[in-house]
Image (spheres, rainbow, N blue to C red):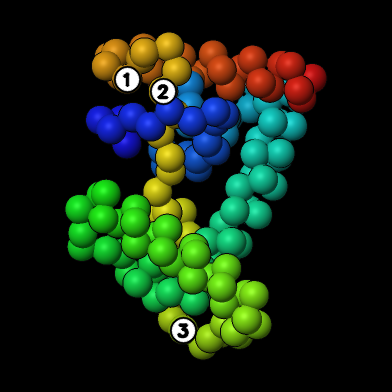
Amino acid sequence: MERHPRAIQGIILGDSGYPIREWLITPFHAPQNAEEENFNNAHIATRNIIERCFGVLKRRFYSLNIGFRLEPDTSCKAIYACLVLHNIAIAMKVPLLEDVDQGMPEDDMPAIRYVANGLENAPERARTEAGKAVRRQIANTFFG
């Protein structure tokens, strides 16, 4: 994702398995105060909604569950096609197959790249510190 930036407005929430960036915000590892704890609670609640959506898509399209062996651009197009077909299935009231084996954890879905301040080529430490600064600002501004 960092090698192929895609400018979007906003930030992406990721679990602690992802590195923190200005555009990819992860929870605080060990919250130190109420703001950080409140931030983590909101982060988890928001991500849970998305994780449930990923689970529904993986039940409808098993290929999303096992992964693609395609080039990244082709994979993106295949995922987009699944989303379009899912919306058509909802409109046509096509039920989900509930007995499909889930296999892969829902945290394995890709994130979208957001580039801020030209840090995509900066050293790892600078990108990590920039992400931590954004996370601190969000926690202090909205969860204090």
Q: Secondary structure at mark 1?
A: helix
Residue drawn where x is 29% and y is 56% of the image: 75
Between the residue at mark 1 and the residue at mark 3, the CA separation in whole angstroms equals: 39 Å
Amino acid tagged 1: Glu
Q: Residues within 10 Å of mark 2 (few under 14, many from 20)?
A: many
* Location of the N terminus (image quadrant): top left
In the shown orientation, is residue 48 left or right of residue 2? Answer: right
Residue drawn where x is 61% and y is 47% of the image: 47
Q: State yes or no: discs 2 and 1 in contact (Cβ < 8 Å).
A: yes
x and y, in percent, of residue 120 in the image: 32, 20
Q: Secondary structure at mark 3?
A: loop
* Location of the C terminus (image quadrant): top right
Amino acid tagged 2: Val
- Of the residues under marks 1 and 3, which one precedes in the sequence? 3
Res 56 visible: no
Q: Which mark is residue 100?
A: 3
Amino acid tagged 3: Val
- Of the residues under marks 3 and 2, which one precedes in the sequence? 3
Report which quarter residue 117 is drawn in: top left
Query: Which of 18 and 9 lies nearest the eye of the viewer?
Result: 9
Q: Which mark is residue 120?
A: 1
x and y, in percent, of residue 86 in the image: 53, 70
Query: Which of 24 and 71 lies nearest the eye of the viewer?
Result: 71
- Of the residues under marks 2 and 1, which one precedes in the sequence? 2
Q: Which mark is residue 115?
A: 2
Residue drawn where x is 59% and y is 84% of the image: 94
Query: Which of 121 and 142 lies nearest the eye of the viewer?
Result: 121
Between the residue at mark 2 and the residue at mark 1, the CA separation in whole angstroms equals: 7 Å
Residue drawn where x is 43% and y is 74% of the image: 61
In the shown orientation, is residue 1 left or right of residue 88? Answer: left
x and y, in percent, of residue 79 in the image: 39, 60
Q: Secondary structure at mark 2?
A: loop
